[in-house]
Amino acid sequence: MSEAKSKKRCAIYTRKSTEDGLEQDFNSLDAQREACAAYILSQSSEGWEAVPELYDDGGWSGGNMDRPALKQLLDDVKAGRVDVIVVYKVDRLTRSLADFAKIVEILDENEASFVSVTQSFNTTTSMGRLTLTVLLSFAQFEREVTGERIRDKVAASKKKGLWMGGGVSFGYDVVDRQLVINQSEAETVKQLFERYAQVKSVPQLVDELAAQGIKTRERKWKTGKTIGGIYFKTGTLTHLLQNPVYIGKMRHKDETYEGVHQSIIWQELFDQVQSIFHTNRKDHALGKKSRNPSLLTGMITDPDGKPMTPAHATKGSKRYRYYVTRTQPGDKSTIWRMPAGEIERLVVDTIARHLVTCSFSGTGDARATEVQINLDRQTSIYLPAMPIAKQRELLLNCKTHVAINAGTIKIKFTPPNQDQPINLSVGAKLVSRGSEVKLAIAPDDGSIKREPDPVLLRLVAHAFAAQDLLVRGIPSPMVNHYKQRHLQQLVRLSFMAPDIISAIVDGTQPPDLTGRKIMRINKIPLDWAGQREMLGFASA
């Protein structure tokens, strides 16, 4: 083996969990580096030599791999610039067994290894790996036990009402590790609670505070970074108005305990504000405050099982509502889109018709059955006519879930006064309309009426306008700007069978009959029977 090949480039990695003491002339990182450098020098006869780069992570935890110097070191290993990683102790490299396995995998892939100066370990042997695994298991155990001990201490202290660090709430200062009222900010806090009790709207209160120039507290970190000192935002103000610290209490997870600090707000005002929040949340969930509420928000999923969210598009003065797949940034999966009105009517009508069917098949106690029949009959009769907030409240109480599939819509709900959920399926068909994929509802009977397709309606109207222009010479602003070829395509549609045109107007045409499909047909038969067969009306 040549001299060049026998040389091993050694990188020294140092780490310290906290920043305490790093400002000293000779700190913990320097001590680690000095010990590692001495070890490398002792191995110079084996061709070991230290690389000039410094890989120091001061103030970074060993519980994860999100450390700048470690990332740079592993990148250099992958690039072939480092052969051996030298550390003072194994736990300087990592305290996580899972992360250790990842690091060893990277080292193996690049024919590199690491050495602990104070512990005789070598990852190139199976015994060395076993010993390291055992050691890191204890290191991870120690870290987890320490974390549990700290969490238990915090929980016990908060049960006693003690402040245990973190962000200091607006209206308080910290003196000797205790919360003390800041009188000037406390007056602002009182105004916020009192004003919200009057306006009952966080966004409105946010605008008022901005107009008055009231801002959050400005905080300066030890690093010199400044945060805060900005206008209140909706989330910040909501958190403030719901914080029990202002009535002298301390919150820990889902529990609230009596605190040792003084309160700023009296209990009655705090309870009034929380009651307003509760009412607003309920109204928002039921769509009472929405100009165009969507009935199935939070209840509907697409064919891939992903939740669908309301969306809308406006063309002229008409507003079209849809349910669209909710996706995450970078998600390139299929986005499903379907008209909201049709699916909402389908769900409401299907549940209402099912309750009518069930109301006449009660068994068991006659008195209980009579009550159930009355409840179900009233629900089934009035459900489609209820305001949308009432409909949504009923569907939420029934734990309704609507799953869109390629050929069916599955509706699951639990009727009032029943324990077992009911599963229903309604026929449907996915069709392509332009660049979109929509769900065309095709119920087994005619009791559920679909909304007419606006594209087909417009084509029919333009077809008769084109007939007036070409046959009778009567101009129409709807088609005057079209070229001759397009006019000839449109006029063919005016000669469709009357029952086909009526079906389009009523919205009862076959689900896959779209404007795009009709316009792509080269020749529509003149006989009505042939038209029905071609356009899918033969079995209707």
Image (cartoon, rainbow, N blue to C red):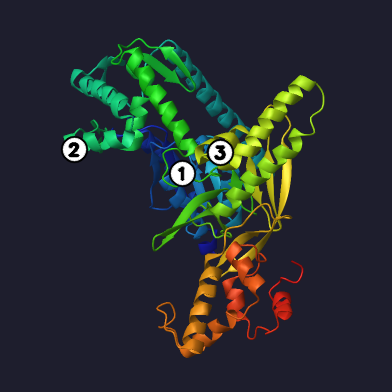
Marks 3 & 2, CB-CB < 8 Å contact: no
Q: Nearer the viewer, mark 3 or mark 2?
A: 3
Residues 83 and 266: in front is: 266
Which residue corresponds to mark 3?
A: 391
Residue 325: horizontal and vertical position, in percent? 55, 54
Regarding residue 127, the answer to whether it shows in the image is: no
Disc on res. 66: 1
**Dot 1 lies on which element?**
loop
Residues 258 and 80: in front is: 258
Going from N to C along the chain, the mark reached first, 3 or 1, is 1
Please state which amino acid type lies under the numbered disc 2. Ala
Going from N to C along the chain, the mark reached first, 1 or 2, is 1
Residue 520: horizontal and vertical position, in percent? 60, 80
Q: Nearer the viewer, mark 3 or mark 1?
A: 3
Q: Nearer the viewer, mark 1 or mark 2?
A: 2
Which residue corresponds to mark 2?
A: 211
Q: Residues within 10 Å of mark 3 (few under 14, many from 20)?
A: many
Residue at the far right in the pictured view: 364
The Cα atoms of the two marked residues, 3 and 2, are separated by 39 Å
Please state which amino acid type lies under the numbered disc 3. Gln
How many marks on residues? Answer: 3
**Dot 3 lies on which element?**
helix
Marks 1 & 2, CB-CB < 8 Å contact: no
Residue 475: horizontal and vertical position, in percent? 42, 83
| Residue pictured at 60% horizontal, 70% vertical | 514
Q: In the figure, is residue 512 to the left or right of 167?
A: right
Please state which amino acid type lies under the numbered disc 1. Asp
Q: Is residue 461 above or below residue 206?
A: below
